[in-house]
Image (cartoon, rainbow, N blue to C red):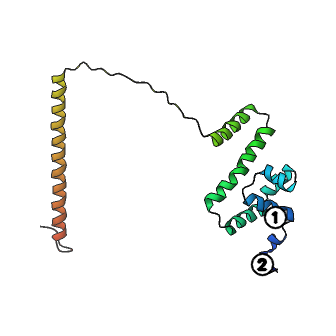
Amino acid sequence: MVILRRRGLSTTLGEACLTHLEKATAVLVAQGMSDQQIHEAICVDLPKIEELRASERVTDTVLRIQVALSMSPEQRIANSVNAAIDAKIRLLNETEDEKIKNAVSTDIMDRHFGKPAQTINTTSMSITANVSGSELDTRMSALMEKLKALEDKRKRIEESRAASTLVLASSPVGQPAS
């Protein structure tokens, strides 16, 4: 990588080739200005600003400026929101497709005003059983007895596993357990 020394600053060859317009655009974008604000500040047509903003050299320079200004990643993301909104507004103005216009305008409103509360349609079901209280108690008792029997069985299995592990652990290496 070729490094040029100019006025005590080290810069790569690619940076040295940035035009004044690219540098000005990069500085304004790094500060979070929208395309419209940049247009008003430096009197350059919006299509040219869009082209400059999309340029890899300007994008790299914007990132370096933001890092040099000690901007947190959150601040850098917040500053790039303007570019996203500008792109959506351009899409809204340039497209003829009503579905796209509706989707973009809804997205812009959701971003600006917040998403509306969403409702969920629910239906309730009523389940009735023709079982008397005493029959229900009998069934519940039977289920509880089955559950207790299963828990006892699980406990016996765990105890037998623990005992077999203990026998294996106490056997000398290479000798079968007696």
Nearer the observer, 122 or 164: 122
Q: Where is residue 76 in the image (x, y as percent from the top left)?
A: 66, 59
Quadrant holding the N terminus: bottom right
The reply to whether the C-beta atoms of the residues labelled 1 and 2 are less than 8 Å apart is no
Nearer the observer, 7 or 135: 7
Going by the image, does 19 lie left or right of 77?
right
Residue lying furthest front: 41
Q: Where is residue 172 in the image (x, y as percent from the top left)?
A: 17, 74
Numbered label attached to residue 12: none
Q: Position of residue 45 (x, y in %)?
A: 87, 51
Q: Which residue is drawn at 17% across and 51% down?
A: 155
Q: Residue at x 72, y 66 (%)?
A: 65
> Above or below — where is 63 with respect to 78?
below
Nearer the observer, 146 or 141: 141
Q: Residue at x 17, y 72 (%)?
A: 175
> Above or below — where is 101 with respect to 152?
above
Going by the image, does 126 lie left or right of 79?
left
Which amino acid type is marked by label 2? Leu
Q: Which residue is drawn at 80% across and 59% down?
A: 25
For label 2, count other residues whose C-alpha is less than 10 Å away and answer few (under 14), some (14-19) or many (20+).
Answer: few
Quadrant holding the C terminus: bottom left
Helix, strand or loop under label 1 = helix
Helix, strand or loop under label 2 = strand
Dot 1 or dot 2: first in sequence order is 2
Going by the image, does 108 lie left or right of 51?
left
Distance Cα–Cα, label 1 vs label 2: 16 Å
Residue lying furthest left: 178
Q: Name the residue under label 1.
A: 23
Q: Where is residue 22 in the image (x, y as percent from the top left)?
A: 83, 62
Which amino acid type is marked by label 1? Lys
Numbered label attached to residue 9: 2
> How many marks on residues?
2
